[in-house]
Image (cartoon, rainbow, N blue to C red):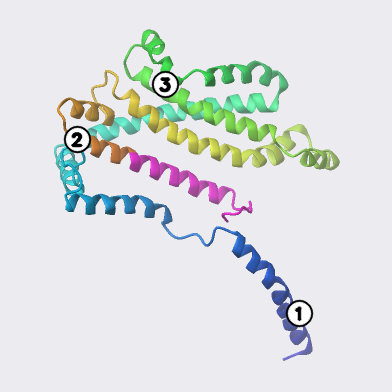
Amino acid sequence: MSAVTTVTTAESTVTVEKDAPQVRRRRRLSPGKRWPAARLAGPLLVVVLWTVASAAGALDPGAIPAPWTVTGTAWRLWSDGTLATDVVTSLRRAALGFSIGLAAGLVLALVSGLSRAGEALIDGTVQLNRAIPTLGLIPLFILWLGIGETFKIAIIAIVVYIPMYLNTHAALSGIDRRYVELAEVQGLSRLRFVREVVIPGSLPGFFVGLRLSVTGSWLGLVVLEQINATSGLGYMMFQAQNYGQTDVILVGLLIYGVFGLVSDSVVRLIERRVLSWRRTLSS
């Protein structure tokens, strides 16, 4: 072994020993190591408790059917094609409303966040819209658009665009002034500053808005599919309510929950990939 290699190894050992206390302190303060599929632990625990309580006879089968009863009902509805049709219809409504709301929220946030004139024209209007309960707009939109698909998609789009706008606009407006000064020193043009500093810096706020918007699209869908609908999970649940079919209602609720959990997990995964450069407590 050469003298250079020996010295390098010794220096590396000393560096590791010096950094060890800092690493231990960081581990003590952090939430801990991320577990694979950890977010499924809570829902699985609820299912286990539900199963145990049903098997022990602690739950009224008429009010809360057992998991095996709900599973059998879901399989029966899927086999006769009813559930598959309703799932596809609900996914289509949610996807269309979400896409329109996402695009509208992003465009409005960019115009308002990057221009004083845009902010003067847009921000006050959006804040006014935010103060009005979205469900309170349903009677007016029924008069304007009827009770067909257009009305449902429009309401979902409104539910989606508000959190998308608010969080993205706040992130755009909250760029650290030091970055602005650094861009001035580097002589960046307005376009390069927006592309290389403002947009990347606003991504954390964008993803917060995206997660809230995804959740909002499902919440809006639950309500809207019970208003003069002829298909969809909400319609299925509404019909089940009329006939006292609690198991069918639970099937719909569980599917909504799975949709919400999966879509939120996908957004979180994309966020971790896109923002892999950002060091946070959870990372």
Q: Residues within 10 Å of mark 1 (few under 14, many from 20)?
A: few
What residue sits 39% from the left and 27% below the top? 220
Task: Please give the label number shown on residue 277.
Answer: none
Q: Which residue is mark 1?
A: 11
| Residue at the front extreme, as displayed | 58
Q: Quadrant of residue 222?
A: top left
| Residue 13 in picture, x, y percent from top left | 71, 80
- Which secondary structure lies at badge 2? helix
- Which secondary structure lies at badge 1? helix
| Residue at the bottom extreme, as displayed | 1
Q: Is residue 279 magenta?
A: yes
Left or right of 91? Residue 105 is right
Q: Quadrant of residue 196?
A: top right
| Residue at the top extreme, as displayed | 143
Label 3, label 2: how far apart the Cα atoms are: 28 Å
Left or right of 236? Residue 105 is right
Q: Which residue is mark 3?
A: 155
Quarter in which the C terminus is drawn: bottom right
- Whether the residues at callouts 1 and 3 have beta carbons within 8 Å, the answer is no
What residue sits 71% from the left and 37% below the top? 175
Left or right of 270? Residue 247 is left
Label 1, label 3: how far apart the Cα atoms are: 63 Å
| Residue 271 in picture, x, y percent from top left | 54, 46
Q: Is residue 164 visible?
A: yes
The magenta span reads 257-283
Q: Which residue is mark 2?
A: 246
Q: Is residue 9 magenta?
A: no
As shown in the figure, which amino acid type bears the numbered disc 3?
A: Ile
Q: Is residue 93 visible?
A: no
| Residue 234 in picture, x, y percent from top left | 28, 28
